[in-house]
């Protein structure tokens, strides 16, 4: 019997091992796929996942090493998730071991038991070897403990005393001399009732007609796979629909998975779930400590957690009783992992639902064009929430022509007047600008010099409060020069960042307390929470911020939204730039007038006649989407074609180019007529952190064609010689192509 183990290494293969040696008389049942196995790897020990058992290995049997220990009796994830991970590794052409590593909390990767309760430890094979032939004369205490443990068979932490402390046990574990044992009896199999009591007062809200129809349509597909697009304008009550269908789906003991773009930015959402369901709601996100993360994972795995709310990687949470998946704000770019294992959690949620045979609800006010196309072709059902409930109205949107209206530091006169009016009437105001820092460049009027980043093809951003120039691409920072590096004349900050806008607003509206939300103000723990609280309590009257403002916030008193600069995305080269701009504008605008007070939105632009802006104003996102899809069809972009990108970077630009050309040549040799390989082309930021960056774009109209091609092509690319320090990666269904 040969064990095939997926190990967390960048190699695109699994590793063969013999099963661990057994003691005489000890039975050795075949392990189940999906258990963790500790193996020797070079001079280290690694923990991997058993992904296959075969009879023979390509490796000479004399060279085949034995695994050290099998850590689990049961697979560490439910069977659908196990298959999903293997499928994802194939689809995204990423090493399986790294895929598992991305899915599991660190503590599990390090070998901690998958169940809580008592942790049992016993002597491992290498521990037994150590006892019979000590390799190390030091650490007598540890060996004494090992002997004691070998005598007892196994111990739990409770069995330890003054002589043998938990720290000693951990030291033994680090050496691989003991292994934890999962107590699967009890915890995993026994049904934890996980009291879920819907809060009756909250559920007494009577649904609007459209909400009721959506709920009924989703519940009609239960149980069984179906994908639903819940297309509801901002503030239309999508969350209420989620809550209702989840209550029904888990009533019979099932579990629900809710994916959200960013939990730190939407604490309200988790709160709403906690209020509605009295128990069993678990949030998983990057802010958790290792222990919290492990406990959340265990609660999901053993069924105690009935509702798991999490960001991107939560799509891999082990949920043996999964009954429903919700993906909130499905269009959000944060569902796509941008480095390493480049998966789309939104897309994987649909695959997972399909494999688990459960419904998935994709909710958004601004669905991605891919999802709209899936709804148009009938693959997804389309459920509409066209209005806000009750008296709340869609906000009134208008354009402000920046060429006609002068202003003060990027704020036009009409915008200032509107702000004054709304503030006077007791409303709150949001000012949106998707650029943090004080000013995007530091400029010499005399000779035209602009402070550059020395490591990137980019300018430094001035951060005035921090007294620094910072590069937003590589993180480089330095002191702020006072005079021009070339001609010694004084330098001027040019353009607007949120920090500068905050300064301007403080001067213009001295009586209105300000709050700012961007990555600079949100970096400290709890900072986001306190900014949001200042807005909710009404203390802050003006909220300035970036993209972070678009994420589903519900501020009842906001009546005016000013978009300072709509033009950033209008002429960008990426084919998704206009889609992103339309989504951003619609989402920010959607923060205005969400309850009783009517909302107003002002969009400042130098191109008021631009068709995109006009269509968005007259026909809304829906009208925009129709014409945007038409353009995509004509140009042959997704969703009417499939893309993959081979990105590479190296310090030597000529060698980088040669590598990509060789990769393109290798693709030509495959003679796949359906595949177009475009490039090499330089990345938008052609040099970042002293590395040149370029890519090939692979395009085809058939999905399976792309998969087949990548499967044949990537092994050829892997064998190409590259310059030292070359790094490359494949991105299937890339979100950004420049
Ligand atoms: P979305 O998720 O679509 O942006 P929310 O679910 O946050 O919208 O709902 C917006 C507001 O409308 C919330 O204050 C919510 O409590 C309220 N709401 C939702 N459904 C109803 C309803 N059926 N009747 C009255 N108010 C509702
Ligand atoms: Zn100068
Ligand atoms: Zn830089």
Image (tube, helix red, strand yellow):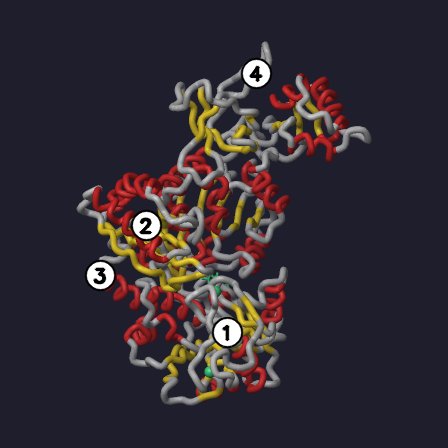
Q: Quadrant of the C terminus?
A: bottom left
Pointer 2: what residue?
659
Mark 4 or mark 1: whose residue is earlier in sequence: 4
Mark 3 or mark 1: whose residue is earlier in sequence: 1
Closest to the observer, 432 or 391: 432
Q: CA distance from mark 2 to mark 4?
A: 49 Å
Mark 4 or mark 3: whose residue is earlier in sequence: 4
**Residue 51: percent from the left, percent from the top?**
44, 30
Q: Nearer the viewer, mark 4 or mark 3?
A: 4
Pointer 1: what residue?
596
Mark 1 or mark 2: whose residue is earlier in sequence: 1
**Residue 148: percent from the left, percent from the top?**
74, 21
Farthest residue to the top: give it. 25
Q: Is mark 2 within 8 Å of ligand 3?
A: no
Seen at 82% across and 31% down, the residue is 162
Q: Is mark 1 within 8 Å of ligand 1?
A: no
Residue 569 placement: quadrant: bottom left
Seen at 52% across and 38% down, the residue is 253
Do the residues under discs 2 and 3 have CB atoms within 8 angstroms? no
């Amino acid at each position: 019997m040969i064990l095939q183990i997926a190990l967390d290494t960048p190699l695109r293969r699994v590793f063969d091992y013999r099963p661990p040696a057994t003691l005489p008389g000890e039975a050795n049942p075949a392990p189940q796929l999906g258990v963790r196995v500790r193996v020797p790897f070079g001079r280290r020990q690694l923990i991997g996942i058993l992904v296959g058992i075969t009879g023979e290995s390509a490796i000479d049997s004399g060279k085949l090493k034995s695994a050290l220990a099998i850590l689990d009796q049961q697979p560490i994830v439910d069977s659908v998730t196990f298959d999903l991970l293997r499928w994802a590794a194939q689809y995204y052409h990423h090493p399986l071991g790294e895929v598992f590593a991305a899915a599991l909390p660190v503590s599990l990767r390090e070998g901690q038991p998958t169940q809580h309760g008592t942790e049992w430890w016993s002597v491992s094979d290498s521990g037994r070897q150590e006892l019979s032939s000590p390799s190390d004369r030091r650490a007598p205490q540890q060996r004494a403990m090992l002997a004691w443990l070998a005598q007892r068979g196994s111990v739990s932490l409770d069995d330890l005393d003054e002589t043998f402390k938990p720290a000693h046990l951990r030291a033994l574990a680090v050496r691989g001399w003991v292994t934890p044992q999962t107590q699967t009896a009890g915890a995993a199999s026994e049904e934890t009732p996980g009291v879920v009591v819907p809060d009756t007062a909250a559920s007494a809200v009577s649904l609007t007609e459209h909400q009721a129809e959506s709920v009924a349509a989703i519940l009609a597909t239960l149980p069984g796979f179906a994908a639903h697009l819940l297309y509801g304008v901002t503030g239309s009550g999508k969350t209420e629909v989620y809550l209702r269908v989840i209550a029904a789906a888990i009533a019979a003991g099932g579990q629900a998975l809710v994916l959200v773009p960013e939990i730190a930015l939407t604490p309200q959402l988790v709160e709403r779930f906690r209020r509605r369901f009295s128990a069993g709601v678990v949030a998983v996100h990057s802010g958790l400590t290792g222990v919290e993360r492990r406990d959340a994972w265990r609660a999901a795995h053993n069924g105690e957690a009935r509702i798991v709310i999490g960001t991107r990687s939560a799509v891999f949470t082990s949920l043996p009783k999964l009954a429903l998946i919700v993906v909130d704000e499905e269009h959000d770019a944060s569902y796509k992992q941008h480095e390493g294992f480049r998966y789309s959690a939104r897309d994987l949620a649909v695959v997972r639902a399909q494999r688990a045979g459960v419904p998935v609800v994709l909710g958004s006010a601004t669905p991605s064009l891919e999802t709209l196309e899936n709804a148009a072709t009938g693959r997804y059902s389309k459920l509409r929430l066209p209005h806000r409930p009750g008296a709340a109205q869609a906000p009134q949107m208008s354009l402000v022509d920046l060429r006609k209206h002068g202003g003060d530091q990027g704020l036009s006169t009409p915008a200032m007047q509107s702000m004054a009016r709304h503030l006077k009437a007791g409303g709150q105001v949001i000012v949106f600008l998707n650029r943090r820092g004080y000013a995007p460049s530091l400029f010499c009027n005399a000779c035209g010099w602009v402070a550059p980043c020395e490591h990137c093809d980019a300018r430094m951003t001035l951060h005035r409060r921090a007294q620094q120039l910072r590069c937003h691409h590589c993180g480089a920072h330095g002191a702020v020069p006072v005079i021009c590096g070339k001609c010694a004349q004084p330098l001027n900050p040019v353009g607007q960042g949120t920090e500068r806008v905050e300064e301007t607003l403080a001067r213009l509206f001295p009586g209105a307390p300000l709050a700012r939300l961007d990555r600079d103000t949100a970096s400290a723990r709890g900072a986001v929470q306190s900014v949001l609280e200042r807005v909710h309590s009404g203390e802050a009257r003006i909220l300035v911020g970036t993209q972070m403002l678009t994420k589903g916030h519900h501020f009842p008193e906001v009546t005016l939204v000013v978009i300072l600069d709509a033009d950033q995305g209008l002429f960008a080269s990426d084919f998704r730039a206009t889609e992103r701009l339309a989504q951003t504008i619609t989402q920010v605008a959607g923060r205005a007038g969400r309850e009783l007070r009517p909302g107003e939105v002002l969009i400042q632009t130098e191109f008021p006649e631009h068709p995109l802006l006009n269509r968005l104003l007259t026909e809304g996102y829906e009208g925009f989407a129709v014409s945007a899809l038409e353009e995509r069809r004509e140009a042959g972009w997704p969703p009417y074609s499939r893309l993959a990108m081979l990105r590479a970077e190296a310090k030597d630009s000529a060698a980088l180019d040669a590598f990509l050309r060789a990769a393109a040549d290798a693709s030509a040799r495959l003679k796949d007529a359906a595949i177009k390989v475009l490039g090499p082309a330089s990345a938008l930021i052609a040099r970042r952190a002293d590395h040149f960056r370029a890519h090939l774009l692979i395009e085809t109209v058939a999905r399976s064609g792309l998969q087949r091609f990548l499967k044949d092509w990537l092994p050829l690319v892997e064998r190409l010689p590259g310059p030292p320090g070359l790094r490359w990666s494949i991105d299937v269904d890339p979100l950004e192509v420049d």
